[in-house]
């Protein structure tokens, strides 16, 4: 019997740069990013769908894009 805990479910939060009520929302997993350095992003309208894994640099680029085109 192993005392190593199994993988924890990913906690997703809505981005503050999302489009509000217009349905253009993304979510990201900050706890996962802190633990692994991998930034997970998904479409909030399809929570069971695919997600994208970004590097810290890639995630920063996505945030900059959202700031200027939001």
Image (cartoon, helix red, strand yellow):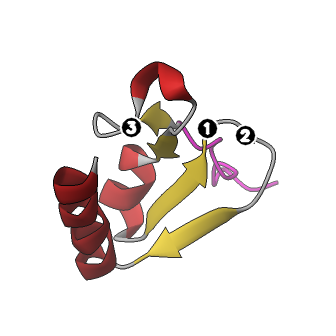
Q: Is residue 55 left or right of residue 8?
A: left
Name the disc covering residue 47, or none: 2
Question: Which region is colored magenta?
Answer: 1-11
Q: Residues within 10 Å of mark 3 (few under 14, many from 20)?
A: some
Q: Is residue 47 above or below residue 69?
A: above
Left or right of residue 52, residue 39 in this image: left
**Height in image: 54 above or below 50?**
below
In the rendered structure, does residue 56 fall within the stretch colored magenta? no
Q: Residue at x 24, y 80 (%)?
A: 57
From mark 1 to mark 3, how far is it between C-alphas? 10 Å
Magenta highlight on residue 3? yes
Residue 21 on image: x %, y %: 49, 19
Q: Position of residue 62 (x, y in %)?
A: 31, 66
Q: Secondary structure at mark 3?
A: loop
Q: Position of residue 27 (x, y in %)?
A: 49, 42
Discs 1/3, front: 3
Task: Identify the residue under disc 1.
Answer: 44
14 or 10: nearer the viewer = 14
Residue holding disc 3:
18
> Is residue 43 toward the left or the right of residue 24 in the image?
right
Is tag 3's residue or tag 2's residue first in the polypeptide sequence?
3
Check contact, mark 1 vs mark 3: CB within 8 A.
yes
The answer to which of marks 1 and 3 sits earlier in the sequence is 3
Task: Tell me whether the residue at label 2 lies in contact with that at label 1, contact meaning CB atoms closer than 8 angstroms.
Answer: yes
| Quadrant position of residue 10 | top right
The alpha-carbon separation of the residues under discs 2 and 1 comes to 6 Å
Badge 1 local density, few (<14 within 10 Å), some, or many (20+)?
A: some
- Residue toward you, 19 or 26: 19
């Amino acid at each position: 019997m192993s005392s190593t805990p199994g993988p924890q479910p990913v906690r997703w939060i809505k981005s503050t740069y999302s489009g509000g009520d217009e349905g253009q929302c993304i979510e990201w997993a900050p706890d996962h990013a802190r633990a692994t350095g991998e930034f997970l992003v998904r479409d909030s309208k399809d929570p069971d769908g695919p997600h994208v894994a970004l590097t810290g640099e890639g995630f920063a680029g996505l945030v900059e894009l959202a700031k200027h085109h939001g």
